[in-house]
Each structure stands twice: as C-alpha cells, then as structure tokens.
Image (cartoon, grey):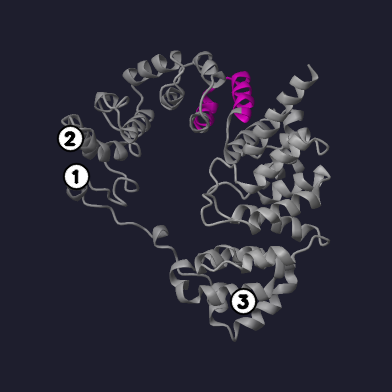
Amino acid sequence: MVEDGMTSDLTVFRAALEKGSGRAMTLLRGDDESHVAALFDACAVNLAHDPQCEEPRAPYLARLIAASGQLEKVYLNLLEVVEAWGDEEETGLWHPLSVLTALAAAHEDLDRTRLTAVIRGQEDEDDRLDLADLLIRLEGFPALIEALGLLAPQFDEDGWMADSWLTDLRLREGEAIEPVLEAARKTNPVLDRALVGRSEDARSRPIEPEPFESLREALRAKQQTRWGPRVTPRSEAERLLLAEDLASLDEAWRALPYLRFFARQPLPGDPRALLRWRNDNDPKVRHFSRMAMEQVDHWAVRAVAVEGLRALQPWSVGLLKSNYRPGDYALVVPVIDSEITPHEAHSLVMDVLAVREKLAPDERHDALVKAYDKTPCSYCRRDVVRSLHEAGQLPRWMAEECRYDADPETVALVSG
C-alpha cells in the first residue's frame, strides 16, 4: 500500500511539474531518486502547454532544484546533457540552458565556465542571438554590447530582442546600470536606438475599414484578409448578406473564410448556416464553426449545447457563453470531471472562465476549484486564482500552492 501511495504521489508530482503548479513544491521529495529524475526531465525539455506564451519555467524549476537538496548534482548532470546536445535533438537548447543560467545566477558557488562555453560555442548566428539573454544574465553589460553588435545588421526587423535584453540587464544590475547605459549610448548607435525604442509596431496603428464589397469578394475568393474580418466591425445588414453567402455554400473549403469571419463578429438571423459545419471532417472548419456558434443567442444553438453537454463534449461548454440558463451548471460538472486531452482541457477551462459570472456563487466557486486542477496552462490557472481571490473564496491550500507557482503574477496574488 505504501508503494502504491508513492507511485500516486510521483504521478501527481509529474503532473504538477508539467503544469508549472506550486503543488510540485509541496510534494517534492529530494531524498527520492524518482522525484529528482522527474524534476531533471522537466529541466531538459520544456513541459509547458504553450512554451511560446507562458512564462519561462527556469525560475520555477530553479527554486525546486534548490529545495530538493540536490542542487549541484542536478546542475552538473544537466550540464553534461547540454554539452552532448546534437543537431538531431528535436527540442531547443534555450530551456535547459535557461535553467542552468537561473541556477548559476542564484548560486555563485556553481561553476559557470562550462555553461558559458556551451552558450558561446553555438556556431549559428541565430542561435547565438536566441541565447544572448542568458549571457547577459550571467555577464551583464559586456554581453549586452556583444549581443547588440550581432543584432545590428537586422535591427529594423528584430530590434524587439533588445527590449528584453535591457530588461534582463536592469534586473541584474539595478539602478546602477543607468549611468553606464547613458554614457555608452553616445558612442554606440545600436544601443542608442535600443534605448530610444523602436518605431510603433504597424499592427498597433489605426486600421482603415475595408470596403464591404472588397471584403465580400475576398471571402468569396477564399482569401484571408488581414484586417477586415478580424478588426473592423460590420453592420448587421452587411453581416446578413455574408450570412446569405455562407448559407449558399456546400463546400467546406469555401465556407471556412466565412466561418473565420463569424467567429469574430456574430452571425445574425438563423444560425443553421453555422450548425451544419460543426462536425465537419476538417478540424479548422469544425473549430471556427463552433467558435462562431458561441456568439449566437438562439434556441437552436442552445439545443446543440445541451445535446453536446449530455454527451460529455467539452466544446459544448463554450456554446453557453450566449445561451446559458439557470441550472445548466449541473450539465457542465460531468464534462469538467471527464477524462479529456490537455488541449481540450485548456479550451474547456477558458470556456468555464467565460461563463463564470453567469453561475450562482456556490456553483462559481466549485467550477473554479475544478478548473484550477484541470487546466494545463499557467495563464488560465492565474485567471482562476485571481477570480477566487477577488471573490474572497481562495482556499487556503490553493494559496499555499500558489506561493510556488511558475507564473509570477499568480505568486504575487497570494504574497500580499
């Protein structure tokens, strides 16, 4: 029985590491090799659900490694892994090197020589740029000037990288670095440009409305317009004409641009033009059809929602955004409790968050506590925790876990 308990404990520990949950800290057993091995695996490969969007996991993992009592062992073993890293590896070096950098920056007794040798040993210039932030965290101002020299030929396109480098340097050095930067910018044009800031991103500029006929023709031709469907609001009369166009189509590839449009602006009138595509073989057609249905308040959409909820279809919860009725939470609970994929769980929790204000207070608390455990995403977990915190309903055990969460904003919520 004890062995089974240990196995279960390890399974929960691994799941917490994958999610970046602070529960990993409460379960960590540094005297158990299986726990240390699981922690090591999380350092070698980024387990985050969306590594490009979620906060880097290095600070989170570094805290766990330090708490494990196996700091030097994990550090040296991870160094051996990155030193032997080959071109055939499918995952990038940045994550394990960022963990090593976080450990070296926090613990001066760790040898940095081999770590900096790996970072500097990258022959590809793009790889050297990608890893420049790590050198800046380790070496400070000289590494920044070196990185800016590499960036200079492509600053117009990739100048955004300098913003994060300056942030890293300021976090490392504090206010003392400001006079150094001011003096250096007088003789370093690239640093001067970085400090001035880049020109406004074109995506943030006001967008002129696309003429309706141009938009309509683009949708008919299955063209993806960058601005019209996604940004510019269209009148109900114009949307009715586009809805008629969609209703006349029988081919999924022709319907897809219209479904993308109505996923962002509600389809008026009879929603059957959307419903017919909700189970199409093409996953994109299915996805955008269901997204479009979420915006429509109509008895036919609600009927689909109820049918889907009874069949434990996670996407059906999203249809309640515009079609929720008191008592529907009883249909939602079995869906949340069901076994689903991480991708489905991510979408499900976002839908639960979207409908939470429609729930009764006790239902909302129950839904958010379930969502906390269900989501694979640290950002969604933060939204769950914030909602519970603002309502004064954050459980004590959850607050304790959140002190060690991978997301710094989640940590801040419970640190006041």
Query: Disc 2 marks which amino acid?
Result: Asp
Span highlighted in magenta in the image: 349-373
Residue in view at x 31 percent, y 52 percent: 226
Determine crowd level at label 3: few under 14, some 14-19, many 20+ residues with C-alpha closer than 10 A. some
Above or below residue 210? Residue 148 is below
Above or below residue 354? Residue 104 is below
Above or below residue 331? Residue 16 is below
Instruction: Residue 241 in the image: state x and y as whole percent.
Output: 18, 36
Name the mark on residue 216: 1
Which residue, given by chain and number where applicable, does mark 2 sit on? 245
Can residue 407 be seen in the rendering of this structure? no
Instruction: Residue 262 in the image: state x and y as whole percent.
Output: 31, 36
Above or below residue 117? Residue 329 is above
Q: Which quarter of the rendered picture does the N terminus lie within? A: top right
Query: Disc 1 marks which amino acid?
Result: Arg
Q: CA distance from mark 3 to mark 1?
A: 50 Å
Instruction: Residue 14 in the image: state x and y as whole percent.
Output: 67, 34
Determine crowd level at label 1: few under 14, some 14-19, many 20+ residues with C-alpha closer than 10 A. many
Q: Does dot 2 land on a helix, a strand or a loop? A: helix
Mark 3 or mark 1, which has the lower sequence index?
Answer: 3
* Contact? badges 2 and 1 (CB < 8 Å): yes
* Contact? badges 3 and 1 (CB < 8 Å): no
Query: Disc 3 marks which amino acid?
Result: Ile
Which residue, given by chain and number where applicable, does mark 3 sit on? 145
Q: CA distance from mark 2 to mark 3?
A: 57 Å
Determine crowd level at label 2: few under 14, some 14-19, many 20+ residues with C-alpha closer than 10 A. some
Principal secondary structure, stretch drawn in magenta: helix
For marks 3 and 1, give the one nearer the viewer. Answer: 3
